[in-house]
Amino acid sequence: MKALFRPLRSLAWLACLLALFASLAGTARAGDLTQAVLLVASRNKANSIYEQAVVLAAPLPDGKGHVGIILNRPTGVKLENLFPGQAATRNVADQVYLGGPVKSDSVIAVTQRPPHDSNYVALMPGLVAVLDGVSVDDIIENTPNEARYFLGFTVWDDGELDSQIRDGDWIVRPADARHVLPANPIDLWLELSGDFV
């Protein structure tokens, strides 16, 4: 019985070790800021706009800095309440989300397909942030429920996000499509923060 216990214990130890290496490798890949990542706010972000926030962050097209959108801050306000004179806004079923403190008085649309000739930033494969008002209006008019609407966004200067990550402000996770625009984003921070915060 003693001989049987030792291999089983060794196998259990090996399985734990492999799981640890796999999780560390996933974290290392997630730390590659040349790709889109999910940023999960640590306790360092308490008492700020980013407290318990999950942010989709993507490199800017010039490679100098990042743009981000808070994914889990529903406002409880519908687009039609913000623009009562625009009849098409009544067709938008979802509420508006707070995307970040930059241009928080402007609505951006996150969608899979931007309108032709629109001003947008690619966030990750198959997902863009449409920034100009004419193109956002086009989406509201033609495909109102194929986008999620946000007030504002976040911008980091070159090296700023790296510095915040080194300071422990963010836990970096891979940008997983199922977490980017979840149907119910309220529990997203709890789901992604795990034991790290």
Image (spheres, grey):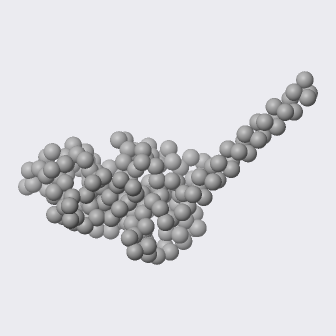
Query: Image check: 41 left or right of 14?
Result: left
Question: Hey, which quadrant is residue 16 in on the image?
Answer: top right
Q: Relative to 150, say whether 8 is above or below.
A: above
Numbered label tally: 0
Query: Image check: 157 left or right of 11?
Result: left
From the top left corner, tell me how far across and down residue 118 is, in percent.
Answer: 22, 64
The residue under the point 33% across, 64% down is 121
Q: Nearer the viewer, residue 84 or 59?
A: 59
The answer to whether residue 68 is seen in the rendering is yes
For the N terminus, the image quarter is top right
Residue furthest to the right: 2
The answer to whether residue 151 is seen in the rendering is no
Question: Hey, which quadrant is residue 108 in on the image?
Answer: bottom left
The residue under the point 20% across, 65% down is 117
Q: Nearer the viewer, residue 148 or 74?
A: 148
From the top left corner, tell me how far across and down residue 131 is, in percent.
Answer: 26, 64
The residue under the point 13% across, 46% down is 90
From the top left corner, tell me how far across and down residue 87 is, in percent.
Answer: 8, 50
Residue furthest to the front: 116
The residue under the point 15% across, 50% down is 142
Residue furthest to the top: 1
